Image (cartoon, helix red, strand yellow):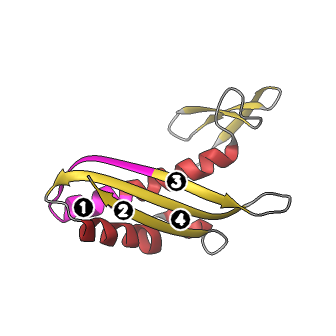
Amino acid sequence: MSIQVDWNKECQFNVTTSNGSVIAVDSENNTAPCPTELLLSALGSCSATDVVLYLQDQGVEVESLNNTVTHTLTDSEPRLYKSANLHLRVKGVGVTEAMVNAAAQQAVSKYCHVCLMLQPNIEVTYSVEVI
């Protein structure tokens, strides 16, 4: 697997993934997400995938899932991520808060490879809501 990064102009780049997908990146955050936003996006989407798969394995018919990732930064430069919270809102047939909690726990501690790579440098927590 490889990622290719091509400079466009200023602080703008095009990232081409191994499957050919192209993602625009702007380090100044004017025209596209900045790299650190993409890091949080990876955390949010990876953990959400694991939650959906866990719930489906439990027989839940997932109708919707929203994962809002909030974060805190260190006080001094360089401003690094200190913590991230995953707030998972799930709607589905047969879903309970206990099931979503179990799914989130498994994602954060066992299955989400992005989360596992970031810990212990970034504290990752979660909260859940069944809608």
- Residue 57 lies in quadrant: bottom left
Q: Residues within 10 Å of mark 4 (few under 14, many from 20)?
A: many
The mark nearer the N terminus, 2 or 3, is: 3
Q: Amino acid at mark 4?
A: Cys
Q: Which element is circle 4 on?
A: helix
Q: Residues within 10 Å of mark 1 (few under 14, many from 20)?
A: many
- Marks 2 and 3, how far apart at CA: 12 Å
Q: Is residue 124 left or right of residue 67?
A: right
The mark nearer the N terminus, 3 or 1, is: 1
Residue wearing tag 2: 128
Q: Is residue 101 left or right of residue 35?
A: left
Q: Residues within 10 Å of mark 3 (few under 14, many from 20)?
A: some
Residue wearing tag 3: 69
- Residue 127 lies in quadrant: bottom left
Asked if the residue under mark 1 is in contact with the one under mark 2, i.e. CB atoms within 8 Å, the reply is no
- Marks 4 and 2, how far apart at CA: 17 Å
The residue stretch that appears in magenta: 50-67
Q: Which element is circle 2 on?
A: strand
